[in-house]
Amino acid sequence: MGQLPDVLFLSKNLSIGDRMAGIAATYEQENRGRASLRRLMPVVERYAYFDHAAVGPMTQPAAEAIQTWVEQSRCHGDVHWPEWSAAAGRLRSSAAQLIHAKTSEIALIPNTTFGINVVAHGYRWNTQSTRKDSVVVLENEFSSNLLPWLALERRGVEVRKVPVDPSGVVSIDAIRRAIDSTTRLVAVSWVGYFSGFRMDLAKLCEMVHSAGAELFVDAIQGLGVFSLNSQEIPIDYLAADGHKWMLGPEGAGFLFVRQSKLEGLEPLMQGWGSLQMAHDFGNSQMVLKDDASRYEGGSANHVGQIGLSESLRVLLELGCNQKSNPIATAVLENAAKIEEGLLSAGASVFRARSSDRLDGEWSDLSGIITFNVPGMKPMDVRKKLLDEQIVVSVRHGRLRVATHAYNDQSDIDRLVDTIRSLNP
């Protein structure tokens, strides 16, 4: 499935009837997309699964591709290695397609943490002058997007942590106040892993660049659901693992480094895979690749890349990289229904939004919602939900729901009805 027709933005010259028919066609296409994805998710046969902000279940195509790899490896050793390597090439192409980048700007990595460390420690920081470089981060970051930057303090880089409102709403103005002439880089998560707050990357990127700094984005909680066009929003670096919203296995992800930034990011972890003559093992010439794959180093996690490639193919066919896409629409609609249902069941619900009223594009919301059941410990509630085969997680003393597009009303009803039974 390609990009949805722009029926919601039809010319004013069309009749009301034509407009309504166009809107109905869009909803029908969106519902088909949701149903198509659900049919490819074996997890729905048992669970109402709402833990995508932790680890998402794999699609059936990913599982089948991995099973094929297992049999090939078990029975044939490395005979099928060229096929596995070709799958890695397809993943690189799909990752580029996902964020509208060049394949030369994509490195395949084992996880988001690895990609963040490539940028944090490969960046050519100035620590010799009296005005040492600084990096700006958010104080409520997941540890993977905080610890690598804090480690730079040992090298003399100043790390500035921006306070975040207890609601989880991130102020771009607060980030701006932390930047000065020494600031080389700003590192943020696109979507907060706990709050679910989604940054306006277009405004943030414009502000960071106008202040003379560069922007790194941890995109693991956004990609697979929300579209990001790196040509329209010129972020400098991005990393994401595929095991959450992209519905792939753990241990496979990608790093984006804008072409113009490659020479400023030293590949500290070099190996045979970093070289232009990667398979000429007797070649003593140390000539690095001229694209982002120079950061990959050594042997690839082919099984993980094969699985992620298949799940990403499914999501791209559903248009997850398009501005208006049924994946994002379904996730946000599900989240709104969950919020309403949990409130009606007596739960205390928390969603980070910059205003109390949803705007037309839900621009700062995501599929992540946190809640508590009055009078009950979150871990006890989680256990009771799991007894009913409803999967959520607990973070920072709250239950966290993270819904995907394939979740449907039956999943939501199971969650809400169970919470209602706990809070009569």
Image: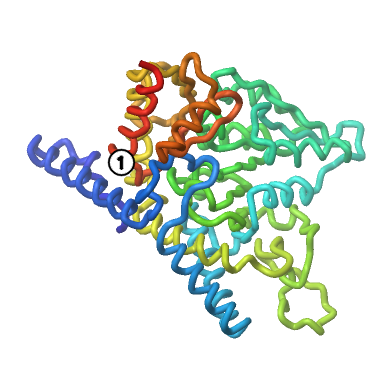
Tell me where residue 253 sits by quadrant: bottom right
Is 155 situated left or right of 234 in this image?
A: right
The answer to whether residue 217 is visible is yes
Q: In percent of the image, x 73 and y 48: which residue is there?
A: 117
The answer to whether residue 336 is visible is no
User: Which residue position holds label 1?
Assistant: 408
Q: Is residue 333 above or below residue 57?
A: above
x and y, in percent, of residue 351 in the image: 46, 23
Q: Nearer the viewer, residue 334 or 268?
A: 334
Tell me the SS state at disc 1: loop
x and y, in percent, of residue 81 in the image: 60, 79
Q: Nearer the viewer, residue 365 or 60?
A: 60
Residue type at mark 1?
A: Asp
Which quadrant of the figure contains the C terminus? top left
Tell me where residue 192 sits by quadrant: top right
- Around disc 1, counting alpha carbons within 10 Å, would you say few (fewer than 14), some (14 to 19), or many (20 or more)? some
Q: Is residue 255 above or below residue 393?
A: below
x and y, in percent, of residue 189 in the image: 59, 37
Q: Is residue 328 above or below residue 63?
A: above
